[in-house]
Amino acid sequence: QKGELVIPGDYQVLTKENRIATRGLGEANKDDNILDIGPIAAKTFQKIIRKADFVFWNGPMGKIEDKRFQKGTKEIIEAIINNTKAQTVIGGGDTIKSLKMLNSNFQISNSVFLSTGGGATMAYLANKELPGLINLDQL
């Protein structure tokens, strides 16, 4: 089955004037800091997650340490929680931090796997050699 790469259609930025603005794809100014997905991107990702049989999530959508840029991540968490039919893999310490920080009611079910090693999880899925596993094979 072919996959599809979905690029966020918009994002939240912090301008050089320290204002929050929504920008469309390709509309960021050179001084903008992109710090969260925008409302169109959040709705697009929620729609995909709601229909998914498998969800792999690795990393928050925005700078969750700043309350102004938590909305995208909160909306993704909500979509994942509400899709009870999907097998879900959540990778990365920052992703798990997001869950704890933004949704204290998150329940780990049999269909959820959490990994604190997001980069290692991605490398494993890409069939890359992992030094720790190579060393275990040599024992």
Image (spheres, grey):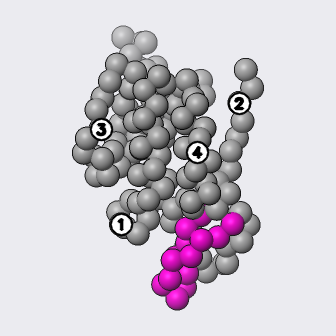
Mark 2 falls on what kind of element? Answer: loop
In primary-sequence order, the first of circles 1 and 2 is 2
Q: From the image, state whether disc 2 or disc 3 is nearer to you.
A: 3
The stretch of residues the image draws in magenta is 11-24
Percent from the top left, x then y, of residue 74? 41, 52
Please rate how many residues cluster around mark 1, counting C-alpha atoms within 10 Å: few if below 14, some from 14 to 19, many from 20: few
Please state, as top left, top right, bottom left or bottom right, where the N terminus lies in the image: top right
Percent from the top left, x then y, of residue 50? 54, 35
Percent from the top left, x then y, of residue 70? 41, 60
Distance Cα–Cα, label 2 vs label 4? 14 Å
Q: Which residue lies most toward the left here?
A: 104
Q: The residue under label 4 is which amino acid type?
A: Phe
Report which residue position mark 1 lands on. 67
In primary-sequence order, the first of circles 3 and 4 is 4
Distance Cα–Cα, label 1 vs label 3? 19 Å
Q: Which mark is residue 81?
A: none
Q: Which mark is residue 45?
A: 4
In primary-sequence order, the first of circles 2 and 3 is 2
Per the image, is 70 magenta? no
Residue at figure coordinates x 62%, y 57% from the top left: 40
Distance Cα–Cα, label 1 vs label 2? 33 Å
Q: The residue under label 3 is which amino acid type?
A: Phe
Mark 4 falls on what kind of element? Answer: helix
Report which residue position mark 2 lands on. 3
Percent from the top left, x then y, of residue 110? 34, 19
Please rate how many residues cluster around mark 4, counting C-alpha atoms within 10 Å: few if below 14, some from 14 to 19, many from 20: some
In this rendering, does residue 74 appear at all? Answer: yes
- Image height of 94 relative to 82, above or below: below
Mark 1 touching mark 3, by CB under 8 A?
A: no
Residue at figure coordinates x 61%, y 80% from the top left: 31
**Quadrant of residue 93 within the rendered picture:** top left
